[in-house]
Image (cartoon, grey):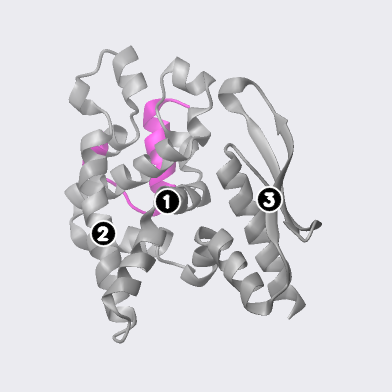
Amino acid sequence: MNNRKVIETLEMRIGYTFQNKNLLRQALTHSSFANEQKINKWDDYERLEFLGDAVLELVSSDYLYRADPYMPEGKLTKLRSSMVCEPALAYCARDIELGNYIFLGRGEEATGGRRRESITSDVLEAVIGAIYLDGGLQHAREFINRFILSDLEDKQLFYDSKTILQELIQKNGEGKLSYALVEESGPEHDKLFRVEAMLDGKKIGAGSGRTKKHAEQQAAYQALLEKRERK
C-alpha cells in the first residue's frame, strides 16, 4: 500500500478527512522511517505526540469532571491516569488497527514495531495532535470521544483488570491469586508470552501478549469476564 493509500484508508477508518494530509503522514511516521528516508528530523511523530498528549489530557479531564459532579479530585486523577496510560491507549489503537498504518524503518519493522505498545500508543496521541492542528479542538474531541472515551466501563475493566480481580478475590475471601507463565515462544526480539491466572492453583483465566505484564492483564480480564457471565 503506497503512502497516499495508507492515509486515505486511515481517514475513512477514523471518519475524519485532513485538509493538510502532511499532518497525518507526519503523525504516522516513526523516527526509524524518517532516518531511512533522510526526512528532516522534525518530520516524525514525536512533536505531534507531545501536543496530542496535552489535548487528550484536557479532553479526558473535562469529560470526567462533567460526568460525575461528586467524584473527588484523587479519584478523578486515578481514573484519568488509567484511561490515558500506555496500555490503555495501545488497546484503543488496536481497535482501529493503527499499527497497520505506521511508517516504520526496516529494522523496527523486523523487530515487531507494529505491535509494540509504546509505539502504537504514541502514534495514537500524534494522530490526536494532528487532528487538533488540522481541524481544531472540536474535531479532536470527537475523535477522542469516539475511540478513547467510548465504552468506558468495559475499557476500564480491561485497563485495571489485575487490580480489580485482586480486590474482588480479597473482598470475597476466595483464596490466593497468582499468575503462571505457561509458554514463551518466538525469537528474542519478538517474544509471545502465554500466562494463566490461578486461584489457589486452579486456572481461572488465560491471556497472551508481547510482554508478561500484558499477558497477565489479558488473563485477569478473561477471569473477570467469566465471573461477570456467571452472575
Which secondary structure class fits the magenta region best? helix
Is 85 one of the magenta-colored residues? no
Q: Nearer the viewer, mark 3 or mark 2?
A: 3
Q: Few, some or many C-alpha atoms within 10 Å of disc 3 (few <14, some 14-19, many ≥20)?
A: many
State yes or no: discs 3 and 2 in contact (Cβ < 8 Å): no
Q: Is residue 28 above or below residue 226?
A: above
Front-lying residue, 168 or 142: 168
Q: Is residue 224 above or below residue 86?
A: below
The numbered dot on residue 179 is 3
Q: Could you tell me which residue is drawn at 73 percent across and 74 percent down?
A: 229
Front-lying residue, 68 or 166: 166
The residue lying furthest to the bottom in this view is 70
Q: Is residue 122 left or right of residue 130?
A: right
The image quarter containing residue 194 is top right
Q: Is residue 173 left or right of residue 34?
A: right
Q: Nearer the viewer, mark 3 or mark 1?
A: 3
The residue singled out by tag 2 in the image is: 57
Looking at the rendered structure, the secondary structure element under dot 1 is helix
The residue lying furthest to the right in this view is 202
How many numbered circles does the render carry?
Answer: 3
Q: Could you tell me which residue is drawn at 53 percent across and 27 percent down?
A: 112
Q: Quadrant of the C terminus?
A: bottom right
> Residue 209: where, in percent of width, then height?
61, 41
Q: Earlier in the sequence, mark 3 or mark 1?
A: 1
The residue singled out by tag 1 in the image is: 89
- Residue type beneath disc 2: Glu
Residue numbers of the magenta segment: 1-23
The image quarter containing residue 174 is bottom right
Looking at the image, can residue 94 be seen? Answer: yes
Looking at the image, can residue 139 be seen? Answer: no
